[in-house]
Image: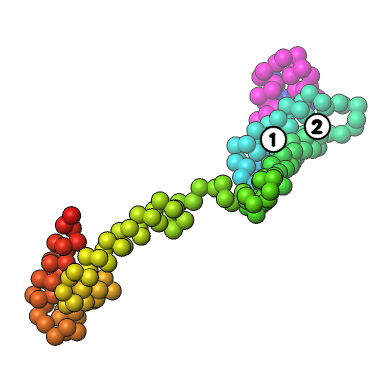
Amino acid sequence: MYHDFNDYELLYMIRQKDEVALEILLKKYQNTIMGIVFGMFRYARMLRITKDELYSAGMMGFVQAIECYREDKKVSFQSFLKLCVERECRTLMRKHRGLSFSLISSSLSLDMTISEDENLYLIDTIACKNPDFDPVWQFRYKEAKKELLEKLRKMPQFDVKVISLRLEGYSYAEIAALCNVTPKAVDNALQRVKKKLTSV
């Protein structure tokens, strides 16, 4: 019965709270709505809008078309529906584009001064995870380096040379060749250094 009704008759039934008529009208124009959504999704995706969000906006346009359509305007419901769906989708994209621009316009320069005497900059208040800029880490590093140098001064020159070459990436065999000793002698030297460095 309902399938023989035209758009105007279905709209009349829908306004009488007939849910079956609403389902029929939606089914009739489902492909039209999806076509508009898919057509706009390529651009919407760049604004981080999901397909579901865009489809929801399209469905809002569908509801709006039902509520606002007037037969006396001499425009077909299909044309009015397309206009409403496109408008809602564009409104959603405009909203997201505005949010993107607001993030840019509300951003602050790290070189901006934040103290009255203009000696403190915004970048000075941001925590830095780089240990090179951590005064506590720097102090401990200098103390450890100083302690290491003191221990190395007390070691035989051969042992210091061996550990230096090893830290530069040379293999046991290469160090042995450079120092004119056996690889076993290199290993013994490294063991002695390790023992002295780990001793309290």
Q: Residue at x 72, y 14 (%)?
A: 17
Q: Does the magenta-highlighted stretch encompass residue 14?
A: yes
Q: Amino acid at mark 1?
A: Gly
The colour scheme is rainbow
Q: Which residue is at the front of the view, 18 or 120?
A: 120
The residue pinned by badge 1 equals 58
Residue 126, image x and y in percent?
54, 47
Q: Secondary structure at mark 1?
A: helix
Disc 2 marks a residue whose amino acid type is Phe
Q: Which residue is mark 2?
A: 77
Viewer-side residue, 103 vs 167:
167
- Hey, which residue is sitting farthest top in the picture? 16
Q: Nearer the viewer, residue 145 or 89?
A: 145
Rendered residue at 69%/35% (across/down): 58
- From which residue to which does the magenta span run? 8-29
Q: Position of residue 142 (x, y in %)?
A: 36, 60
Q: Is residue 189 visible?
A: yes
